[in-house]
């Protein structure tokens, strides 16, 4: 790449600037931003001299990426895995936005607990768990006031509980950069309620692309059952019309929760049947792309261009040959 298009990064470990040391020995850096519950991940591959000190597991990394000194903060990561190999001596560092050990904040999300929750709003439940794990809660406004009549957490981690609830309500939950996010899936909005960005991509921006359109996962109607306390009967709610029909096996404690679950399931099915894959050179105009945001294609074709695509994951990879971006997406169904 020319001098006018020089990719750069900034990396601090436990507050210490190690950018130059990493750059001098760099093989590659990749950053994967994921939608949903899967943790964002930073992977660094370097040649490590024998005399060099190996960074510790649990170190806090702050990473920024961009071009010509204009860098975008990509968040905070915890070193989760170190792999040394050779010859020559090489080090791979894998760091996650949600650490899986108990040495740093949010590790307790993986500890199993047993307790029950009654008549609790989603905002209160998420706030309690966030506080217990030294995280800051962020719940999308349309989810915050929803009330769960009763739910049991039996020998289950906080993350597993929240994931189970998120699936029921058509939401995604993810610890990231010191926050515990609980947001509406494919809503096109951030946890604070503001609109997610839409990036316009022309065919000239990309190296390779693929759009796949499938009817395999199409669901026209979803049925969910619930227990009617007043009558003692098992009732059902139905969302959508036509065939094929998907029946949720779990029986919910009330109609509201059954309705939410059915709505979430049909929304997920409608959004995930089509898929997008793009490979392109890293470009400064697209450094602010985030998972759960949207891309609008232009000049690819009638099926490809409409409607916009939701970003499920983005991977930036930086090496001596430059920076590349890999984007995976689906249609999504904004509220």
Image (spheres, helix red, strand yellow):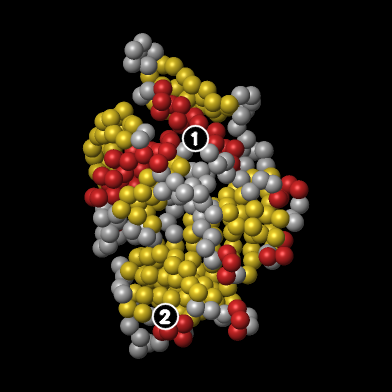
Indicate whether 145 appears above or below 38.
above
**According to the image, label 2 marks what residue?**
19
* Distance from the alpha carbon under mark 2 to that under mark 1: 43 Å
Identify the residue at horizontal 49%, vertical 21% (top origin). Answer: 237
Quadrant where the image shows the N terminus? bottom right
Q: Are marks 2 and 1 in contact (CB under 8 Å)?
A: no
Residue pushed farthest top?
231
User: Element type at marker 2?
Assistant: helix
Kind of element beneath mark 1: helix
- Nearer to us in this view, 244 or 118: 118
Q: Is residue 304 left or right of residue 58?
A: right
Kindly identify the residue that appears in the image at 40 percent across and 75 percent down.
11
Category of crowding for the residue at label 1, using alpha-carbon neighbours closer than 10 angstroms: few (below 14), some (14–19), many (at least 20): many
Q: Position of residue 190 (x, y in %)?
A: 45, 50
Q: Position of residue 120 (x, y in %)?
A: 28, 34
Q: Quadrant of residue 260?
A: top left
Q: Position of residue 233 (x, y in %)?
A: 39, 13
At 39% from the left and 62% from the top, the residue drawn is 96
- Locate residue 164 relative to residue 157 in the image: left or right: right
Q: Which mark is residue 288?
A: none
For marks 2 and 1 on the same chain, the one whose residue lies earlier in the sequence: 2
Residue 22, image x, y percentages: 43, 81
Other-residue count near label 2 (Cα within 10 Å), few / some / many at <14 / 14–19 / ≥20:
some
For this rendering, which residue is in front, 143 or 51? 143
Residue 264 tag number: 1
């Amino acid at each position: 790449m020319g001098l006018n298009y020089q990719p750069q990064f900034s990396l601090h470990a436990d507050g210490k600037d190690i950018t130059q040391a990493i750059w001098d020995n760099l093989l590659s850096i990749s950053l994967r931003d994921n939608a949903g519950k899967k943790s964002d991940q930073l992977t660094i591959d370097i040649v490590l001299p024998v005399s060099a000190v190996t960074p510790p597991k649990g170190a806090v990394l702050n990473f920024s990426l961009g071009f010509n000194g204009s860098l975008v903060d990509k968040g905070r990561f915890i070193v989760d895995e170190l792999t040394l190999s050779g010859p020559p001596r090489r080090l791979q560092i894998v760091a996650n936005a949600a650490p899986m050990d108990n040495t740093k904040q949010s590790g307790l999300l993986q500890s199993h607990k047993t307790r029950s929750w009654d008549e609790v709003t989603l905002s209160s439940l998420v706030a309690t768990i966030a506080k217990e794990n030294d995280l800051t809660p962020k719940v999308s406004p349309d989810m915050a006031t929803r009330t769960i009549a009763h739910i049991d957490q039996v020998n289950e981690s906080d993350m597993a509980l929240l994931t189970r609830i998120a699936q029921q309500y058509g939401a995604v939950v993810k610890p990231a950069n010191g926050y515990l996010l609980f947001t509406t899936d494919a809503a096109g909005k951030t946890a604070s309620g503001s609109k997610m960005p839409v990036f316009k991509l022309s065919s000239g921006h990309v190296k390779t692309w693929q759009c796949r359109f499938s009817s395999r996962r199409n669901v026209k109607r979803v049925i969910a059952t619930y227990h009617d306390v007043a009558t003692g009967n098992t009732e059902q709610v139905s969302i959508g019309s036509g065939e094929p029909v998907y029946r949720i096996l779990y029986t919910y404690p009330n109609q509201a929760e059954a309705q939410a679950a059915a709505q979430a399931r049909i929304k997920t099915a409608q959004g995930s049947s089509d898929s997008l894959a793009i490979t392109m050179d890293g470009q400064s105009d697209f450094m602010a792309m985030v998972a759960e945001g949207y891309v609008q294609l232009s000049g690819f074709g009638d099926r490809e261009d409409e409607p916009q695509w939701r970003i499920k994951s983005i991977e930036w990879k930086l090496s001596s040959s430059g920076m590349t971006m890999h984007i995976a997406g689906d249609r999504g169904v904004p509220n």
